[in-house]
Amino acid sequence: MAGFAAYGRKMFSIALIFNSLVCISYAIGLLAGFYLDNWVLYFPFVINGNLFWLVIVASIVNIFPAAHVGKVKTGRLWFHHYVYGFFVWFASVALLLLFTSVSLFSLVTANITDIGINAGRFFILGGMALVLDDLPDVSSVTASALSWLKSKAYQGRHLVHSVQFLMGCVSVYFSVSVGAWIALNPEGATVANLILVGTLAINGLISFMSVKRKIWFRIKPNR
């Protein structure tokens, strides 16, 4: 029977993955506004909206170290937790499409303030976090693909380690920039913007924690 410490690490790992997914979701929405509606994003602190692509890269790079934190032996209730993740993901998408007027495209890209829709988004990202944390167990195909990626990351571990540090700096830059913009424009102190500042800061901390612990040097390719 796994102890409380193991379950705590697993929950912490899933929370970190969820944070990365929230950052990706925000960046996609902001980039959609930038390209489709000509939004000016947090100027003058963010000099060009295209830079938000770096937030997506930083968040993707953080997902593996976040999942690595949760590599502990825990019991399971009937099924692997990726099963619950898929269920939550599909159920949330289906309910939103059935009972709201939002389209699948708008669900991913639109700036929506409706509490019900955003609650649905929360569960969608939560389901995705459960799946990503348990991805090697989904199928032999995903396990093989992850093993291949792990071997490539091991070969380029020095480069990936450096990229992780740079992406941490990028996340902190965006967090500070959005925070500074809010300070200059108090009307912009919305819940969404404050969450963005916090998630970006956590994204940066994940990167720096991974660099300090040399996570990418601990990756060993499967034999």
Image (cartoon, helix red, strand yellow):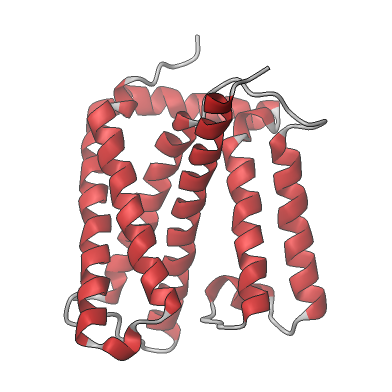
Tell me which corner region of the image, top left, top right, bottom left or bottom right, holds residue 1: top right
Residue 2 location in percent, x, y?
63, 20
Foreground pick, 162 / 191: 191
Image check: 5 left or right of 193? right
In this orientation, does residue 156 appear? no
Q: Is residue 185 above or below residue 212?
A: below
Which x, y percent locates residue 83?
76, 40
Q: Position of residue 199 (x, y in %)?
A: 39, 59
Which residue is most to the front? 4
Q: Is residue 107 left or right of residue 92?
A: left
Hey, which quadrant is residue 216 in on the image? top left
The residue located at (79%, 59%) in the rendering is 91
Tally the numbered discs. 0
Residue at figure coordinates x 36%, y 88% from the top left: 38
Q: Is residue 223 above or below residue 144?
A: above
Relative to 204, 77 lies left or right: right
- On screen, residue 65 versus residue 41, left or right, reads right
User: From where the camera sits, is residue 153 visible?
Assistant: yes
Query: Residue at image x 29%, y 37%?
Result: 209
> Can you tell which quarter of the image residue 194 is in?
bottom left
Q: Position of residue 145 (x, y in %)?
A: 56, 30
The residue sitting at 57% across, 70% down in the picture is: 108
**104 and 128: which one is in front?**
128
